């Protein structure tokens, strides 16, 4: 962990910077889109090099594979035009390494059990965010780390609306088991906050940007039936969760689809990715704290 810490700190700095408007403004001063993509590509590879040399796990084939993956994502909108078909290809590309569990095979754990592949996931998320918002210049609606008061309120409302159906269906399908936490209240509260903000700023940030800020927004702009846009984005959201832990995980995909409806309604009401992030993070934190499965 001491050896991996410098790489983690570098990645966290890059990850945080990818969300801020100031970063996008700075990139606009670089010059060409090709140079912007090159900077993104190098920044994504840097934490792996720091980590792999510090932990003596560097492998040339893993580095080459990582370079190809990061390069395709970084240069996608440099080499291809900004059209809906290529936007769809970008989303498929963004999902593929996560669904196929590529990063655990690249970021090899020196002790065999520490989840060092989190470095790859963070780099992949923020590279996708940067390529989409800077190179594609996509406007997903309100986006960022900290929701405003109205976004907190809407996100919590839809969390409460979909919580009961998700819990009842999860128990009925035996996809989850109720396991209330035990211990001191302050420890439970601290763990709960850690789960929530971890889900808000990592899991929900990337997934809600792509499924609500891109897919649902595009459908809302094309269709006059908002609920159909919400439903389609929720179905796609549920479908990618077929790969959760095993394939096909139908029960988890169904539960994720219901979550997608709640998040989609929050986004449709506010046009804010931050509002749907709140709904998403609340459900994930509740699942982690009170249920197993």
Image (tube, rainbow, N blue to C red):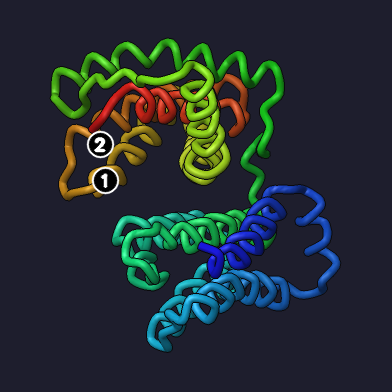
Residues at circles 1 and 2 in contact by the CB criterion of under 8 Å: yes
| Relative image position of residue 261 (x, y in whole percent) | 39, 25
- Along the line of sight, which residue is nearer the eye, 229 or 43? 43
Q: In which quarter of the image is the C terminus?
A: top left
For label 1, the crowd category at 10 Å Cα-Cα, with few meaning under 14, some 14 to 19 and many 20 or more, is some
For this orientation, the residue located farthest to the front is 184
- Along the line of sight, which residue is nearer the eye, 262 or 116? 116
Asked whether the viewer can see residue 31, the reply is yes
Label 1 element class: loop
- How many labels sit on residues? 2
For this orientation, the residue located farthest to the bottom is 60
Earlier residue among tags 1 and 2: 1
Residue 83 sits above or below residue 143 on the image: below
Q: Which mark is residue 244?
A: 1
| Relative image position of residue 95 (x, y in whole percent) | 39, 55
Q: Which mark is residue 153?
A: none
Instruction: Say which residue appears at 58% left-offset and 75% top-offset.
Output: 50
Q: In this view, does 253 lie to the left or right of 83?
A: left
Instruction: Say which residue appears at 82% left-offset and 56% top-offset.
Output: 25
- Along the line of sight, which residue is nearer the eye, 93 or 228? 93
Residue 36 sits above or below residue 282 on the image: below
Label 2 element class: helix
| Relative image position of residue 138 (x, y in whole percent) | 64, 50
For label 2, the crowd category at 10 Å Cα-Cα, with few meaning under 14, some 14 to 19 and many 20 or more, is many
Residue 125 sits above or below residue 55 on the image: above
Asked whether the viewer can see residue 222, the reply is no
Q: Residue 253 carries which label?
A: 2
Instruction: Say which residue appears at 43% left-offset and 79% top-offset.
Output: 57
State the separation of the CA atoms marked 1 and 2: 8 Å
Instruction: Say which residue appears at 18% left-offset and 49% top-offset.
Output: 246
């Amino acid at each position: 962990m001491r050896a991996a810490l410098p790489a983690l700190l570098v990645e966290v700095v890059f990850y945080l910077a990818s969300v801020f408007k100031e970063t996008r403004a700075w990139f606009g001063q670089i010059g060409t889109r090709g140079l912007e993509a090159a900077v993104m590509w190098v920044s994504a590879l840097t934490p792996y090099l720091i980590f792999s040399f510090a932990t003596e796990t560097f492998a040339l084939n893993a580095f080459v594979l990582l370079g190809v993956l990061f390069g395709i994502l970084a240069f996608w909108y440099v080499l291809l035009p900004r059209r809906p078909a290529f936007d769809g290809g970008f989303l498929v590309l963004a999902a593929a390494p996560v669904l196929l569990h590529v990063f655990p095979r690249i970021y090899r754990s020196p002790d065999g059990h520490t989840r060092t592949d989190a470095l790859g996931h963070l780099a992949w998320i923020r590279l996708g965010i940067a390529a989409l918002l800077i190179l594609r210049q996509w406007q997903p609606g309100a986006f960022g780390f900290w929701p405003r008061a109205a976004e907190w309120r809407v996100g919590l409302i839809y969390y409460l609306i979909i919580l009961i159906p998700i819990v009842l269906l999860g128990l009925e399908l035996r996809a989850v088991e109720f396991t209330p936490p035990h211990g001191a209240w302050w420890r439970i509260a601290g763990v709960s906050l850690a789960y929530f903000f971890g889900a808000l700023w990592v899991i929900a940030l990337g997934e809600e940007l792509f499924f609500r800020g891109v897919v649902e927004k595009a459908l809302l702009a094309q269709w006059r039936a908002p609920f159909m846009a919400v439903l389609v984005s929720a179905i796609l959201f549920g479908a990618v969760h077929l790969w959760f832990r095993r394939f096909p995980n139908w029960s988890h995909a169904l539960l994720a689809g219901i979550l997608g409806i709640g998040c989609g309604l929050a986004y449709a009401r506010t046009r804010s990715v931050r509002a749907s992030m709140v709904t998403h993070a609340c459900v994930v934190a509740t699942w982690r704290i009170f249920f197993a499965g």
